[in-house]
Image (spheres, rainbow, N blue to C red):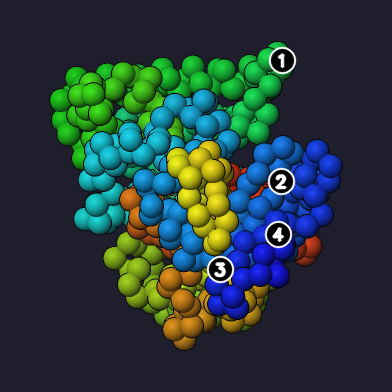
């Protein structure tokens, strides 16, 4: 019997309603006090579980086959739901947020910027930026590794995707504005009312937005004046025409680029931050990683060409992506009536494909809560159930980029530094847009 009192055959997918709803508030109190513990409890009830968010329903999907169906059946499901609507309201329509009917031209326009052949060039920037970041580190100092890795990934995004030929100083100015802007976007997505009240934070956000827009406009003008195709995302967007054959305005170009960075920066930075923390908590894994890096690199700095010789480092990243998938929840709206796991969903229903839950299914992963990069070389991972980059037409365009960046950053940092958490208390994952580890103060020591 499932939560709605419907008897389902043993092998059939089950739908249910999460128990413990409060009058009017539904399950919001559970989500507010212990969101991950609440989510963790859902698969025991079914593969598709209805959660009540006040008066609205959210259907949480944790079965890999159902996730595949929701993410690939684009005639029935579109990108929508509160999260996408709110990001769109703040940043406009970019590739990572646009609905299906605007998706095709945007994906086509941007795809060449993520071609595998470009990864070598990007890898050089990734290692240079990691060096620039760690050059500021001193043994004995404490840094918030979540902040540091975010600084790294925003800098890499600015340098690789849209700032060919600009000075290091201008790129840093732009990165700093973007930093404030992206954090501000998160705040506005969660609490849109912040813009109604004058405050120093609102002033900072508005100044950053103005600086960002002016900076992008200056770069666009420079790209147009130079008339050179830099082969990067901005060059492609400058040449692109939208679904109506129209070129993008400067503000639209700025929004497109910001959305691209929004999709790529905190996702990748949280992988590196989680990895550094998990390694500190698992000395045997750390020792094995050090052994691989020391043998393969022999003290030389890591480069993109070295990655195929670092399989264990790659497995550490893959395992972090399994355990703490940054894009932990991918939402969709049903555009027509449909049936899923035996439940009839009316048009407008919101679904949340919970990649975090899929990656922790007991029936698909041995000891799913265990951080064990060794499971990859042992061939124990069900590829069907491992979907950190999503699926189908909207599968992450930056998957190679993100993997390359996270693996290089991890190799570069751990070959030269040992990081120890200031507090041994396990970090509490913060499920916002990205599953972040929250602040992670760590003590630096040279290796
Ligand atoms: C390890 C890091 C990353 C993870 C885990 C990740 C995860 C994802 C996931 C799950 C999606 C699918 C969303 C959906 O279907 O609605 C996605 C889409 C996307 N990601 Fe990533 N991502 C990462 C890194 C990056 C990077 C580095 C970039 C760009 C520089 C990027 C840009 C995008 C864009 C633009 C989309 C939308 C693609 C489309 O709709 O065609 N991501 N990502």
Q: Residue sitting at 74 percent across and 39 percent down?
A: 54
Q: Nearer the viewer, mark 4 or mark 2?
A: 4
Q: CA distance from mark 4 to mark 2?
A: 14 Å
Q: Pick the residue in front: 363 or 295.
A: 363
- Report helix, strand or loop for mark 1: loop
Q: Residue sitting at 40 percent across and 35 percent down?
A: 98
The residue that mark 3 highlights is 13
Q: Quarter of the image holding residue 181?
A: top right
Density class for disc 4 (Cα within 10 Å; few <14, some 14-19, many ≥20) is few
Q: Pick the residue in front: 140 or 8.
A: 8
Q: Is residue 434 above or below residue 19?
A: above
Disc number placed over residue 311 in the picture, else none = none
Q: Nearer the viewer, mark 3 or mark 1?
A: 3
Quadrant, the N terminus: bottom right
The residue that mark 1 highlights is 197
Q: Pick the residue in front: 209 or 158.
A: 209
The residue that mark 2 highlights is 52
- Report helix, strand or loop for mark 2: strand
The residue that mark 4 highlights is 4
- Residue 445 in the image: x percent, y percent? 63, 63
């Amino acid at each position: 019997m499932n939560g709605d009192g419907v008897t389902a055959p043993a092998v059939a997918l089950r739908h249910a309603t999460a128990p413990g709803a409060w009058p009017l508030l539904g399950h919001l109190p559970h989500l507010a006090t212990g969101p991950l513990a609440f989510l963790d409890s859902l698969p025991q009830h079914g593969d598709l579980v209805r959660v009540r968010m006040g008066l609205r329903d959210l259907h949480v999907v944790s079965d890999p086959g159902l996730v595949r169906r929701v993410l690939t059946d684009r005639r029935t499901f579109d990108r929508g739901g509160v999260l996408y609507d709110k990001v769109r309201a703040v940043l406009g329509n970019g590739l990572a947020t646009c609905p299906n009917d605007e998706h095709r031209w945007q994906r086509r326009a941007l795809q060449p910027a993520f071609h595998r052949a470009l990864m070598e060039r990007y890898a050089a920037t990734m290692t240079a930026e990691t060096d620039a970041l760690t050059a500021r580190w001193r043994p004995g100092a404490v840094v918030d590794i979540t902040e540091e890795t975010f600084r790294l990934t925003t800098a890499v995004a600015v340098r690789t995707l849209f700032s060919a030929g600009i000075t290091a100083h201008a790129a840093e100015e732009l990165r700093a504005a973007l930093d404030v802007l992206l954090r501000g976007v998160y705040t506005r997505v969660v609490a849109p009312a912040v813009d109604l009240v004058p405050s120093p934070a609102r002033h900072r956000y508005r100044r950053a937005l103005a600086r960002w827009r002016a900076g992008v406009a200056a770069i666009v003008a420079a790209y147009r004046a130079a008339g050179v195709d830099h082969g990067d995302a901005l060059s492609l967007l400058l040449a692109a025409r939208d679904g109506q054959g129209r070129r993008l305005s400067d503000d639209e170009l700025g929004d497109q680029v910001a959305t691209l960075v929004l999709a790529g920066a905190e996702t990748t930075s949280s992988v590196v931050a989680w990895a550094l923390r998990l390694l500190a908590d698992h000395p045997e894994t750390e020792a094995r990683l050090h052994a691989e890096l020391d043998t393969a690199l022999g003290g030389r700095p890591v480069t993109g060409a070295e990655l195929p010789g670092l399989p264990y480092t790659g497995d550490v990243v893959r395992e972090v992506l399994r355990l703490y998938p940054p894009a932990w929840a991918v939402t969709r709206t049903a555009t027509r009536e449909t049936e899923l796991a035996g439940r009839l969903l009316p048009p407008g229903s919101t679904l949340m494909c919970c990649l975090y839950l899929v990656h922790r299914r007991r029936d698909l992963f041995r000891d799913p809560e265990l951080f064990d990069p060794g499971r990859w070389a042992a061939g124990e991972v069900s590829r069907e159930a491992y979907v950190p980059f999503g699926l189908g037409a909207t599968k992450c365009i930056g998957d190679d980029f993100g993997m390359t960046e996270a693996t290089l950053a991890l190799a570069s940092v751990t070959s030269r530094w040992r990081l120890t958490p200031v507090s041994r208390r396990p970090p509490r994952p913060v499920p916002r847009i990205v599953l972040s580890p929250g602040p992670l103060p760590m003590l630096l020591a040279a290796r």
